[in-house]
Image (cartoon, rainbow, N blue to C red):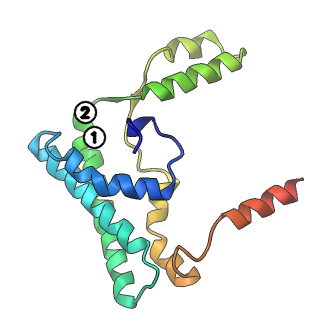
Amino acid sequence: FPHNISDVCQQAAQNFEDILQCAIPVFEGLFPSEHDRVVCTLLFRLAHWHALAKLRLHSEDSLHQLDKTTRLHGHQLCKFRDFTCTAFMTMELPLEVAAWHWRKDSKPNLTSNTTSSMTSAQLKTFNLATYKFHALGDYVNTICTFGTTDLYTTQIISYIIVFHDR
């Protein structure tokens, strides 16, 4: 593992899986007890969902279990957002602030109003309204339609798009 997980960008799937498998003991006891239960349950549900989603052979029962786990995981994410995230103020990581400053310095046409508000770390909130979270609910249908997730890749489509644009 890298020394500081939060500084790592562009995680590969196997790195994410390794981090997830080791995360529960790391986070256990880190938060007040009511939030600790929410965080550890969320990590467990995510690990359970991930294990089911990456199976190479599915049955009706495993797909039903994945669908049920997806729903439970969604409820746990909402509980995490509504209960735990509101109890803590989270700020941008130093790496994100540095990246913003690098982009600002490379674009001289930014106005002073924009730059004055972005000189330090900004408040970050947990956002469930992203495609990554939305797509979790489509895994069962995708597996039924295209097969298990190890059978296809987006690299082929990406190559076709790049080749077509030339």
Residue 92 in sight from this viewpoint? yes
Q: Is residue 150 above or below residue 79?
A: below
Residue shown at the point (86%, 54%) measured from the top left? 165
Residue 11: mark = none
Task: Sort mark 1 into few (<14), some (14-19) or many (20+) by Cα contacts within 10 Å.
Answer: some
Q: Is residue 148 left or right of residue 49?
A: right
List x then y, in percent, for residue 149: 52, 73
List x then y, in percent, for residue 131: 52, 55
Residue farthest toward the right in the current orientation of the protein: 166
Residue shown at the point (28%, 50%) measured from the top left? 23
Residue 85: mark = 1
Residue farthest toward the left in the current orientation of the protein: 33
List x then y, in percent, for residue 104: 63, 19
Task: Sort mark 2 into few (<14), some (14-19) or many (20+) by Cα contacts within 10 Å.
Answer: few
Residue shown at the point (54%, 45%) measured from the top left? 10
Q: Secondary structure at mark 2?
A: loop
- Looking at the rendered structure, the number of numbered marks drawn on it comes to 2
Q: Is residue 164 left or right of residue 147?
A: right
Q: Secondary structure at mark 1?
A: helix
- Badge 2 is on which residue? 88
Foreground: 30 or 165? 30
Residue shown at the point (44%, 72%) measured from the top left? 54
Question: The N terminus lies in which quarter of the figure?
Answer: top left
Foreground: 153 or 82? 153
Q: Is residue 121 above or below residue 18?
A: above
Give the amino acid type for the residue marked by disc 1 in the picture: Cys
Q: Is residue 164 left or right of residue 108?
A: right
Residue 70 in sight from this viewpoint? no
Q: Is residue 10 above or below residue 159?
A: above
Circles 2 and 1, Cβ within 8 Å, touching? The answer is yes
Give the amino acid type for the residue marked by disc 2 in the picture: Phe
Q: Examine the image and state in which quarter residue 41 appears.
A: bottom left
